[in-house]
Amino acid sequence: MESRLILPRRRLLQAAGGASLATPFLGARANAAQVVNVLGVPGLHVKLWQEWSAMIREETKGEVEVRFDPLGYAPAFAKIKTEAESRSFTTDLFYGDSPFPERLALDGLLERLPYDDLPLTQELDAFARGEFTLEVFRTNWGVAAFNTNFVRASSFTTPLTWEVFADPRWKNRLSWADPRGFPVWIPIVVELFGENGWIDYCRRIDANVKTYNARWIDNRIGLQRGDAWITFMNLANIYISTQIDKASVSGFPITQPEVGLGVLPVSIALLKSAPSRTGALKVLNLISSARYAKVMMDIGLNPSNNPANYPHPMSDKILELNNASKVGLNSWADVQKHTMKTDWVAWAGKMDRYVQTWEAEILRRRG
């Protein structure tokens, strides 16, 4: 008979600091009617899913148990691909940041979310309900203040645009995301500068780029170490927890603002091959509600899209602590004015063509 290991709460909380768990955790009941397997990321997300799984178990009266395995982005993505190739399916939900959900959709592995079956998602902003993914944190694609996390916003006296990256003052001081590994900036640049102008913009910023990093975290670490003075990633969020000395992203310490306020937003998606589809839909529905969203804020994650608790004072506090008013952002509503409504699923289908153009026109000529 299969044996299941129930991890004690203390051990789980210790693991939540960023280290992956050797064994996925289960809820207290081992005789659940359906076990929903979620592949995701470590850090505070482990604590989030620990709290959520207990709430789900109570709300479904033990009919649904959540097993959350914090493998990390790339290993989780590889595991899902392996399951598809071997046709041995165990994963129900994928919890991770772009571009992985888009790639899974492009590969035909994600199911379109049946929102008629998920009434609680009606509480979410429409932007949080993509065709294939549910944004469980507020995301701000293409915010005009780009994404230095407003770290050096105080050094600017005029509102920022994407042209700032081409400013000669950043010669050899700019780190940028390599689109072969992290292409999410390409749709933003194409929409800003057009089909005929986006690659010219790439040439202009290339004159300032010191390093192209395939992983967003490398850009973030570069800022910390002083390898770069300014960087682009993809989201306007502060990647730290509520306690500076315990703050981390994938295990790396982040110690920037005086008060920690949030971590990386992620999406959750339903696999076409989900063996516990009914239970997975219950999970998706429940975590969309205000009560579940509140848990994110309680443990130090970002405020959610739920109108019942957003805007939240914490979101404006993020801007205040990072001098955002000096670049024309006085409230979170100001940030939303600069947010692009990008169809990421459509872009996943044509992204490769743009990446190839960038590689030919920028990277190869760079030497």
Image: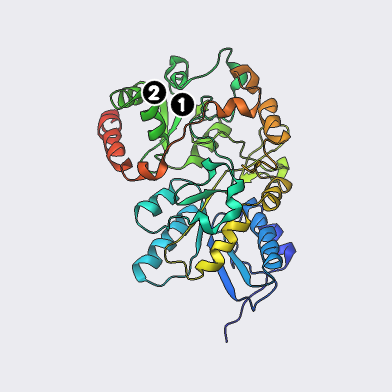
Above/below status of 212 relative to 296: above
Percent from the top left, x then y, of residue 232?
Answer: 48, 31
Farthest-out residue, front: 116
> Residue tagged by mark 1?
174
Q: CA distance from mark 1 to mark 2?
A: 8 Å
Report the residue at 63% width, 23% height from top.
324
Mark 1, Cα crowd under 10 Å, few <14 / some 14-19 / many 20+, is many
Percent from the top left, x then y, of residue 264?
Answer: 58, 43
Percent from the top left, x then y, of residue 331?
Answer: 66, 26
Q: Is residue 192 left or right of residue 332?
A: left
Secondary structure found at label 1:
strand
Percent from the top left, x then y, of residue 244?
Answer: 71, 40
Q: Are marks 1 and 2 in contact (CB under 8 Å)?
A: yes
Q: Is residue 10 left or right of residue 198?
A: right
Report the residue at 59% width, 66% height from top.
67
Q: Earlier in the sequence, mark 1 or mark 2?
A: 1
Query: Where is residue 316, by image quadrant?
Result: top right
Q: In the picture, which quadrant includes the C terminus?
A: top left
Farthest-out residue, bottom: 1
User: Which disc, if any, is residue 205?
Assistant: 2
Secondary structure found at label 2:
helix
Q: Is residue 296 left or right of residue 74?
A: right
Report the residue at 53% width, 42% height from top.
126
